[in-house]
Amino acid sequence: MATTQPNTQQFRLLLNEIKENVLVASHQKINLKQVVSSGSYIYDYKFNKAKYLADKVKRSSTELVTVIEKLHKANKNPRLGDTLTKIMVNSKFVKELYLEPAKVLPIIEQIERDLKEVEKTEQLENEINEFEHEAAAAPMQRPKSGETKMNFELPPLPEEISDNIKADVEELEKCFYSGCYRSSIVLCGRIMETALHRKYFEITGNDALEKEPGIGLGKLIARMSEQNIKLDPALPQQIHFINQARIFSVHTKQDAFVPSKNQAQATILYTLDVMGKLFT
């Protein structure tokens, strides 16, 4: 029988269960160490209940470590490597310190913060993959008679990102002319993210993708400003527009965002213009 591959949702459920039980022990002032070391729980209802709670936390924390180890091993995204490593190390601390709620709770809260970044990245990548499959299945259309064809030409790019961005722009052109406007906007966001991270590295020598894999485009621009990196005055506004369009396209909302052709075209024009300003 095939085993199910662990996922972040399973890890999240285990973490929530541990946190809930540790909070119960903390609020009820249960001394888990004493409960585990004492044998009197056999004849005492309260001790028996507390021992059950301690055993439950122990089992869950052991399983938590097993799941994160498998997730870390199966991970193929270098951007998530460091974050998953942090989560794995802290999960092992939870397993070791499960009898001490005061020490475990802050560690669980740190895991929760790191896990949010992993979940955010996974959600974005899943959405992008879905959009790309949609675009690949759509027939390539050509501009209608009398319609001006958009110029998808790129400036000379750093060798390290050139192939990735060119591939994304080719996909972007196909998406746009196939009427996949949400996919077009998502790809614009990815192109912009790749370009900004490279520009930041060229100027500062710091790889934000490695040190802060979850950093947003807005924070990256703010970091550049803090380090007196001069950008075209209109650039932050253009990047903000692209980023907001991407967020609305990717994340599930109560009212679905269905961009028009003009909105997609404007996002593409802004993206290509920003690329020119960053690398020309």
Image: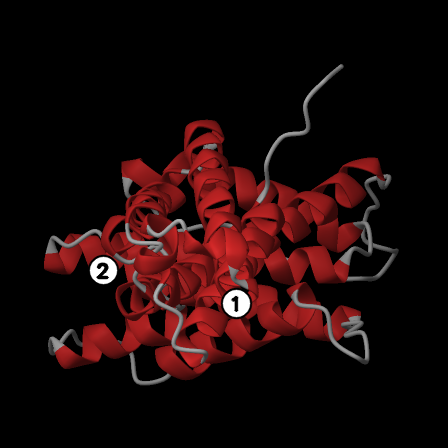
Q: Amino acid at mark 1?
A: Lys
Q: Earlier in the sequence, mark 1 or mark 2?
A: 1
Total number of numbered discs in the rendering: 2
The residue that appears at 64% across and 43% down in the rendered structure is: 171
Vertical arrangement, residue 3 with respect to residue 44, above or below: above
Seen from the viewer's position, the closer of residues 122 and 205 is 122
Residues 203 and 66: in front is: 66
Residue 143 image offset from top left, x and y in percent: 81, 53
Kind of residue indicated by mark 2: Tyr
The residue identified by callout 2 is 200
User: Is residue 214 something that shows in the picture?
Assistant: no
Image coordinates of residue 266 in percent, x first then y, are 62, 73
- Residue 209 position, x and y percent, is 30, 51
Determine the residue located farthest toward the front in the rendered image.
43
Element assignment for label 1? helix
Position of 157 compared to 20: left or right? Answer: left
Residue 253 in view: yes
Name of the residue lying farthest toward the top: 1
Q: 10 Å neighbourhood of mark 1: few (<14), some, or many (≥20)? A: few
Q: Is residue 241 above or below residue 80?
A: below
Task: State the scheme by which the image is colored.
Answer: secondary structure
User: Is there a contact, CB below 8 Å, between mark 1 and mark 2?
Assistant: no
Per the model, the C-alpha gap separating discs 1 and 2 is 58 Å
Tag 1 residue: 46
Q: Is residue 231 left or right of residue 43?
A: left
